[in-house]
Image: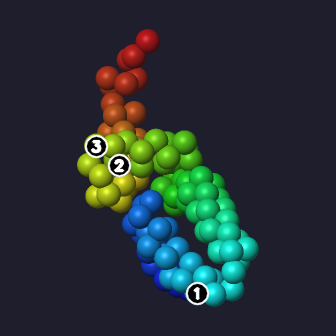
Amino acid sequence: MGFLAGAFNIVPYLGVIIALIPALLLAAPLGIVKLALVVLVFIAANQVEGQFLSPLVLARQTDLHPATVLLSILSGVALVGVMGALLAVPLMALAKRLMEAYYYPSRLYQRSP
């Protein structure tokens, strides 16, 4: 079940719902309390992973601020959809590296007030 949830977690938003369906089917014979606990665990895990862990891991790997990671993902989803969400952070990291390599050392940046 955990592998399935992790594999579907690649797809933002929809992956959690797809992974939740088999877990609910397995918990259905055990009663309504178990169903509620399964939903609660999936929601809590998704929120912790999406709001805290992913931005921190991506921020450390790409040397970007976690807020920049979240905003770039949100912008990518709004502009292009799922592909935008997947490409937003690498493109932002590339833009940062290009600024550090070419713009910051340039005379144009050095002369700015």
Disc 3: which residue: 79
Disc 1: which residue: 26
Q: Are marks 1 and 2 in contact (CB under 8 Å)?
A: no
Q: Is residue 23 above or below residue 97?
A: below
Q: Is residue 47 above or below residue 108?
A: below
Q: Are marks 2 and 3 in contact (CB under 8 Å)?
A: yes
**What amino acid does circle 1 point to?**
Leu
Q: Total of numbered circles in the picture?
A: 3
Per the image, label 3 sits on a secondary structure element best described as helix
Q: Residue furthest top?
A: 113
| Residue toward you, 113 or 48 | 48
Badge number at residue 2: none
Q: CA distance from mark 1 to mark 2?
A: 32 Å
Q: CA distance from mark 2 to mark 3?
A: 6 Å
Query: Which is more N-terminal, label 2 or label 1?
Result: 1
Disc 2: which residue: 77
Residue 86 spot, x, y in % from top left:
35, 59
